[in-house]
Each structure stands twice: as C-alpha cells, then as structure tokens.
Amino acid sequence: MPNQQHASFTTRLALAMAACLALLAAMAPVRAGAQAPASVALLAQRFSGVTTPGPNFDLVQSVIDFGPGAKGAEITAPVPHYVSAVGGDLVADIDGTPQTIPAGKGIAVPAGARLVISNANTAGTTRAFVSSLLPLAATASVHQLSGPGVTIFGTSRLTMSGAPATVDIIQSGARYDAGFKSSVHIMNEPHLMTHLEGVTGYTYVDGLSETYRPPAQGQMYVGRPGYMQNVGSEKSAFLMTWVSAPAAPLTTAVTPATTPQPPAPAPPNTGTGTGPSDDARWSPAAWIAIVGAAALAGLSLRRRHAR
C-alpha cells in the first residue's frame, strides 16, 4: 500500500509540474520577429533664401484641418506663407491658379497673393500646416481660416531675435510608436513644435525632463543635449518649423562617450507592453527552478510521512 500511495503521489506531482511548465511557456514573451518601435516622417519640406522681417520677429504656425471636400475662405497673404499638406493632398489656388500640394510636401505663397486652400478628397480629412514669419505681435488671416468643414487644430507662436537676414524655413514632423526613443542629439537651430497626438517627452542629459500633449507648443532647447521619446501607450506625433541659418546642420549627434545618457524614465505600465523590461522581471527559468525545488521538497516530505 505505501508503494501504491507513493506512486500515486508521484504521478500527481509530475502532472502538476507539467501543467506549471506549460503555463510558464505560454507566459514567456515571443521575441522572434518582433519589431523595434519606430519613427515615421510626416513631412519634410525646405524653403531656402527666405528674407526675415527684421532682427526680431515672430514665427507663427498653424495646424488646420480640412474635412472631406472642405474649402477655406479666400485670404490675401500679407507676408509669404509656407503651406504643407499632412495626411493627404490639398489644393492651393494662388491668384486663380490651382496647385496640388502632395501629402508630405509644401509650397510657398508669395506676399500679396490671393489664396484659397481646399481639400479635394471627399472621403477623409487632410491637415494643412502653415508657417509664417511675422512682425512682432502681427497677425495674418491665413492662421484664422474659416469655412464649412475647416477647423483650426492649434496655433503656436515663438518670438525670435538675432536671426540672419536670410534663413531657411524647414517644415517637418514625425509620428512615434509607443516606446520609441530618439538618439541623444543637440538641436542647433531655433524651431517650434505643435504636438498633434499622444504624449511626447524631452529628456536632457542634465536631468531636466518635460512632456507635451496636444495641442501644446514646445521646443527642445537649442544647444542642450537630450533625446525625444514617446512616453505614452499610444502613438505620439508633432509638426515643427525650423528657422535656420542657410544650409546649417539642424542637429548634431551626441555619443555616450562624450555625453553620457541618463536612463530614460519608465513609461507607464498600462498592460500594453510599455512597462518595465523583461530583464526587470523574474525569468521563466527562475520560476521553473522555484517550482522544481518546491516539488522536490514536497516529495521528500511525503516520503518521510510514508515511512
């Protein structure tokens, strides 16, 4: 009888261990084929040889949504405007001549021109990103467009001083996957960002950290090493305008050998894979060792009782 009880107990123990191992195997992360979080460009357009309004001026930029088939009211541009399309094509009618603005690209609208912006797409919304260099505190009707289906998402403004008489205007933007973090770099030229979605963080190697949500404006401080990252659980995105000295490099990469990078703050653990890394958790092998040790201890104790 003791041998039969021992055999029965051993069988049950083996089945329990097998179930535990199967559960742990199911819980183990599948790493094969996994893709690292990425950054996708939304816009890349450079306008060279732009004359500034003076030594001090305001950079003003607006994100304007055009619903399906929407058409803005006609305006007259008091200063040159730089208009790009995001998420679809737009049509800019300049002095009676329509021009298509392809998604991710832009056109320059000269001062004094009559301008009408419209969305020929009848199935989806397209965004216009408009940048202007205005005299201090001045306004421009292009940043106040109206019309059925036309909505101003957000307008940002930044006063600049000491700029050269001629600059390059660069419009750009990006969308970050959850968990994406850029390399450490230095922003060399003045710029202004408008945040479109999600939560984007700026972290500097000196320890300063800032976060931005839509439709806030922001900028990484010029000359201050740091990195940008998506600190939320959903995608984040932004559009930006650079006011750069002609042909100047916009950024400079910083290697850890010259400027050490502090550890990034852990994004919130929302159950979507954005919590602490697996290295910070007990590995399946560790759990298997624990289960095995417990099973052996139980078997030893059972044998003592059988005696």
Image: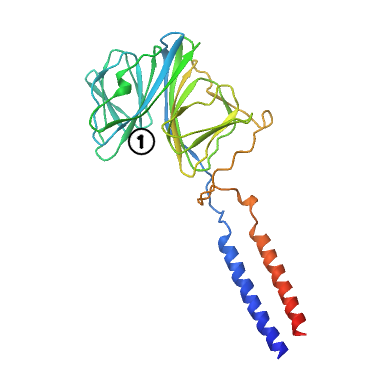
Q: Is 258 drawn above or below residue 38 in the view shown?
A: above
Q: In this view, does 175 lie to the left or right of 259?
A: left
- Residue ID at (46%, 43%): 234
- Residue ID at (35%, 19%): 81
Compare residues 189 and 151 and report the one nearer the observer.
151
Compare residues 120 and 26 and report the one nearer the observer.
26
Q: Is 287 drawn above or below residue 111 in the view shown?
A: below
Q: What element carries label 1?
A: loop
Horizontal and vertical percent for residue 3?
72, 88
Q: Is 102 drawn above or below residue 157 in the view shown?
A: below
Compare residues 240 and 45 and report the one nearer the observer.
240
Horizontal and vertical percent for residue 168?
45, 17
Image quarter where the N terminus lies is bottom right
Q: Which quarter of the figure has residue 239?
A: top left
The residue singled out by tag 1 in the image is: 87
Mark 1, Cα crowd under 10 Å, few <14 / some 14-19 / many 20+, is some
Amino acid type, callout 1: Gly
Q: In this view, does 250 lie to the left or right of 100?
A: right
